[in-house]
Image (tube, grey):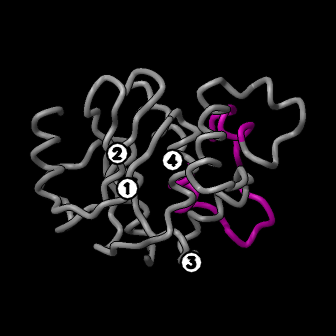
Amino acid sequence: MMHTSDSLAAEFRRVRERPDTDAAPPVLALFVIDVSDDAAAYVERLRSVLAPAVRLGCTADFEQESLPVHEVPGWFAAVGSGAGSGDEERVPRFARAGREAYAEHTGGGRPWDLQDWLYRFDPDEDSRGWEWWDATAAGPFRVHVRVDNGGESFFGCQDLLWAVFTAGAVRVEGPTVQNASVWSAERGIRG
């Protein structure tokens, strides 16, 4: 999926505030996520990780050796593979459990280095096959995350799964491609 400064700016707006139902593309990819605690708290944590990353996509100089991380939540920076040994104390239980669930889900996938993860938001990076669309609480411990994936049945989303799991997911199903009207109806019911 190609990302442009305009598409990243629109994605940033969707991360910060939920989009209108009439703005949706024809289809969206759905991830059904079971979480370890309150669904609303989970959605806020996930958004708190994605917002600074998407903002960097809009503003950062990706020619630099490293990107600024001051807006990234400390727990997310500490849960990755590049964190120092003293950082593990800063990793909340939900993030440690999510790191383990990610490894199990991906068949032994290693933790992401924070800088590697952030560089996925480079507009010229084509391996990120998705753009954030919305998250909806589907129950007290279930969240539906939808992304625009250009309607593809297969797309690169390991970076998204890393954020999803470390924000507190215990199980993830998907992605499945659905007509956007399913999201619109769900959004109208659950707000």
Q: Secondary structure at mark 3?
A: loop
Q: Is residue 71 visible?
A: no
Residue at image point 29% right, 33% down: 137
Residue denoted by label 3 = 124
Residue denoted by label 1 = 174
Which amino acid type is shown beneath numbered disc 4? Answer: Leu
Q: Is residue 85 visible?
A: yes
Residue denoted by label 2 = 32
Q: Position of residue 57 (x, y in %)?
A: 55, 62
Foreground residue among 146 and 133:
146
Foreground residue among 105 and 7:
105
Mark 2 is surrounded, within 10 Å at the Cα level, by few (under 14), some (14 to 19) or many (20 or more) other residues, namely: many
Q: Earlier in the sequence, mark 4 or mark 1?
A: 4
The C terminus lies in which quarter of the figure?
top left
Q: Are marks 2 and 1 in contact (CB under 8 Å)?
A: yes
Looking at the rendering, the stretch of residues picked out in magenta corresponds to 50-79
Which amino acid type is shown beneath numbered disc 2? Answer: Val
Question: Is residue 77 magenta-colored?
Answer: yes
**Closer to viewer: mark 3 or mark 1:** 1
Residue at image point 17% right, 59% down: 180
Q: Earlier in the sequence, mark 3 or mark 4?
A: 4
Q: Earlier in the sequence, mark 3 or mark 2?
A: 2
Q: Earlier in the sequence, mark 2 or mark 1?
A: 2
Tell me how far mark 3 sits from mark 2, CA to CA: 29 Å
Q: Which mark is residue 50?
A: 4
Question: Is residue 35 magenta-colored?
Answer: no
Q: Earlier in the sequence, mark 3 or mark 1?
A: 3
